[in-house]
């Protein structure tokens, strides 16, 4: 549905985006994750044809954003970081205005107004002046204007900003429902948001794409070597001294005991046959094994690792 092709963007001497390419599929939520200044907003502005890229392009359902910006825009609902709400208007007036600008009228417009009122939770402030409503309601009115024409593609810049935890849960549920037949791209600098929402993640840093994939694929990139949890019924000191003397073991950490069982964290550098060697040792010693499980880095660990690797590249 969305294809980003080698997009680059310069603001004077600032390289805001450099060779960014990825695909976002229908029925999936793609999370754009990156620290402030990474280039997330710039990329969303290019996708919505508010900005013309310095290099490369993107297509929305086959429409090139630089060559057919209006056709591309028709397919998109966009919620910018700061939604341009008209403070003097009532909430319903504002949404009628946006709906009309999107070409809706008559029963179709009324039906969409009812839909956004209910699904974005705007009932309590439907007849309020926009200047009076709270930050959370402003955010939801912003989401309603992006959804009023029932777009195929939703592009949401930091959609959870200003929402309280209950409202965040409500918007997450709505996004999951919407993603069943739409393509959703949202940006955030908050890891928990991508963990909770995204089917695929694109990580940007200093305008560069430093990782792309599912959560599992990204954490896999950062899990260097082999990391295992071992739970065995054995004497703690025996396990410790045996494994400490094993050439394949680079790190051994006692985690705790559970009844007769003791738990260790064991790791080895890439390329070492840790699992097979451990199995041999356990077998030879006759320890009763309850668990030998591969550990994965958390998304947070992976994110920090990817960022520091990128910064090292910068310094070189
Ligand atoms: P993010 O949304 O990830 O915080 P942005 O896309 O807003 O990142 O910004 C990326 C980089 O481009 C930053 O270094 C920012 O200062 C710069 N930038 C963004 N907009 C402009 C602009 N209009 N003029 C000059 N520099 C800009």
Image: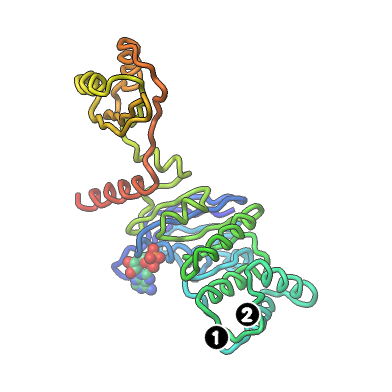
Task: Characterize the local packing of mark 2: few (<14), some (14-19) or many (20 or more) Cα atoms within 10 angstroms.
Answer: some
Check contact, mark 1 vs mark 2: CB within 8 A.
yes
Q: Is residue 199 visible?
A: yes
Task: Characterize the local packing of mark 1: few (<14), some (14-19) or many (20 or more) Cα atoms within 10 angstroms.
Answer: few
Q: Which mark is residue 69?
A: none
Residue 116 lies, with reference to residue 251, above or below; the image says: below
Residue 95 lies, with reference to residue 179, above or below; the image says: below
Front position in the image: 283 or 32: 283
**Which residue, given by chain and number where applicable, does mark 2 sit on?**
125
The Cα atoms of the two marked residues, 1 and 2, are separated by 9 Å
Count of numbered labels shown in the rendering: 2
State the image coordinates of residue 287 (x, y, percent, origin top left).
34, 15
**Which residue, given by chain and number where applicable, does mark 1 sit on?**
132
Query: Which quarter of the rendered image does ligand 1 occupy?
Result: bottom left
Residue at (63% x, 63% y) in the render: 75
Q: Residue furthest top?
A: 284
Q: Compare marks 1 and 2 and give the one earlier in the sequence.
A: 2
Residue 218 lies, with reference to residue 35, above or below; the image says: above
Render colour scheme: rainbow
State the image coordinates of residue 175 (x, y, percent, origin top left).
59, 58
State the image coordinates of residue 101 (x, y, percent, origin top left).
66, 78
- Rendering quarter of residue 235: top left
Residue at (52% x, 53% y) in the render: 197
Front position in the image: 57 or 241: 241
Residue at (57% x, 89% y) in the render: 88
Task: Determine the secondary structure under disc 1.
Answer: helix
Residue at (38% x, 57% y) in the render: 34
State the image coordinates of residue 281 (x, y, percent, origin top left).
30, 14
Left or right? Give the position of 29 relative to 300. Answer: right
């Amino acid at each position: 549905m969305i294809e980003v092709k080698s997009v680059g963007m310069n603001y004077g001497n600032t390289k805001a985006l450099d060779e960014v390419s990825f695909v976002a599929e229908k029925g999936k939520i793609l999370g754009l994750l990156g620290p402030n200044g990474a280039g997330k907003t710039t990329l969303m502005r290019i996708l919505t044809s508010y900005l013309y890229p310095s290099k490369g392009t993107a297509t929305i359902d086959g429409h090139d954003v630089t060559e057919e910006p209006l056709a591309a825009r028709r397919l998109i609902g966009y919620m910018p970081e700061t939604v341009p709400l008209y403070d003097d208007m009532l909430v319903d007036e504002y949404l009628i205005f946006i709906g009309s600008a999107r070409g809706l009228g008559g029963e179709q417009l009324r039906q969409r107004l009812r839909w956004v009122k209910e699904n974005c939770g705007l009932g309590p402030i439907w007849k309020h002046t926009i200047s009076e409503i709270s930050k959370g309601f402003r955010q939801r009115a912003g989401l309603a204007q992006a959804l009023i024409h029932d777009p195929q593609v939703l592009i949401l810049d930091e959609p959870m900003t200003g929402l309280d935890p209950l409202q965040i849960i409500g918007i997450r549920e709505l996004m999951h429902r919407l993603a069943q037949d739409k393509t959703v791209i949202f940006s955030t600098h908050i890891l928990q948001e991508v963990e909770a929402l995204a089917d695929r993640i694109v990580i940007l840093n200093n305008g560069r794409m430093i990782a792309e994939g599912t959560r599992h694929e990204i954490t896999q990139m950062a899990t260097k070597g082999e990391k295992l949890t071992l739970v065995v019924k054995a004497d703690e000191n025996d396990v410790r001294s045996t494994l400490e003397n094993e050439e394949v073991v680079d790190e051994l950490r006692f985690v705790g005991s559970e009844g007769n069982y003791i738990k260790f964290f064991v790791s080895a550098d890439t390329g070492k046959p840790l699992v097979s060697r451990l199995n041999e040792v356990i077998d030879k010693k006759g320890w009763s094994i309850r668990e030998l499980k591969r550990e994965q880095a958390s998304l947070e660990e992976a994110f920090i690792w990817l960022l520091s690797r990128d910064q090292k590249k910068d310094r070189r």
